[in-house]
Image (cartoon, rainbow, N blue to C red):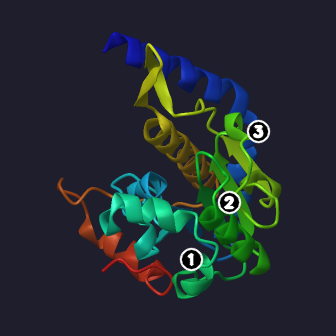
């Protein structure tokens, strides 16, 4: 158990050291778009979709965050089904209605390997819509051949890459030839929350009311959350 915490801390320290400057730049770019009416879209397949869901409607979390849900790419559609569909070159085109981009939006595409069709096509669709596109992926995989017909990997089609530094295979620990103890969800969640916390801090320097959800499980002013939902319900489904 201690070994996992040790390796996880080492990886978190590496991400902080290597990605701190870029995350600060990304936060500035997001703030400038939020102030012009944009929102942040999160897209991922399988376990990456869990990260998109995790940042949505969170107590203490940024309000204008919208997870893009393509049902056949989610784990509850079936683990094997989701994995198969992520490699399907037609899946995004067949589910374009799940993507609702507007001017000043930001789209963050989450994919550890950056090589499958769904995240690459989602990024391309976002680019065609004229929004700022970022990826959260591990560049450790950059030598892994893409499955996309264009010959491009995810990092080749986005505006900014946030490197998670996850090792190939995801596991932080080893037993003989076996790799285990995955880290992509923990690291990915930490990166997203660190990014959004910086966004919130930047907004706090120029506005009094922050787009942050308060917990429904403590005695707070529920009017705040109702106001936040009213502000963004035309763009984000909170039902």
The image shows residue 37, relative to residue 186, as above or below, that is below
Task: Residue 219: give its label.
Answer: none
| Helix, strand or loop under label 3 | loop
Can see residue 98?
A: yes
The residue that mark 1 highlights is 91
Q: What is the C-alpha distance between the residues marked 1 and 3?
A: 25 Å
Name the N-terminal-most of marks 2 and 3: 2
Q: Residue 67, percent across and down? A: 47, 68
Task: Residue 30: give its label.
Answer: 2
Quarter of the image holding residue 239?
A: bottom left
Mark 2 touching mark 1, by CB under 8 A? no
Q: Nearer the viewer, residue 210 or 88?
A: 88
Name the N-terminal-most of marks 2 and 1: 2
The residue that mark 3 highlights is 143
Q: Residue 222, percent across and down? A: 25, 68
Residue neighbourhood size for the residue with mark 3, other residues' Cα within 10 Å, grouped as few (<14), some (14–19), many (≥20): few
- Residue at the spot 78% in from the left edge and 79% down from the top edge: 128
- Residue at the spot 53% in from the left edge and 47% down from the top edge: 192
Q: Nearer the viewer, residue 154 or 231?
A: 154
């Amino acid at each position: 158990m201690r070994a996992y915490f040790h390796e996880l801390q080492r990886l978190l320290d590496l991400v902080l050291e290597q990605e701190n400057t870029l995350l600060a730049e990304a936060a500035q770019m997001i703030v400038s778009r939020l102030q012009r009416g944009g929102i942040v879209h999160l897209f991922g397949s399988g376990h990456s979709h869990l990260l998109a869901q995790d940042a949505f409607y969170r107590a203490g979390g940024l309000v204008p965050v919208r997870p893009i849900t393509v049902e056949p790419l989610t784990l509850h559609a079936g683990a094997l089904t989701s994995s198969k569909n992520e490699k399907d070159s037609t899946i995004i085109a067949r589910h374009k209605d799940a993507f609702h981009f507007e001017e000043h939006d930001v789209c963050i595409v989450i994919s550890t390997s950056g090589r499958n069709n769904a995240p690459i096509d989602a990024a391309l669709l976002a680019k065609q819509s004229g929004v700022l596109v970022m990826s959260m992926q591990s560049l450790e995989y950059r030598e892994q051949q893409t499955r996309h017909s264009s010959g491009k990997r995810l990092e080749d089609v986005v505006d900014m890459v946030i490197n998670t530094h996850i090792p190939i295979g995801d596991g932080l620990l080893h037993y003989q030839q076996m790799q285990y103890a995955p880290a992509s969800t923990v690291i990915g969640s930490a990166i997203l929350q660190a990014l959004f916390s910086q966004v919130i801090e930047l907004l706090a320097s120029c506005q009094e009311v922050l787009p942050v959800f308060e917990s429904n499980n403590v005695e707070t002013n529920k009017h705040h959350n109702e106001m936040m939902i009213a502000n963004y319900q035309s763009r984000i489904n909170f039902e």
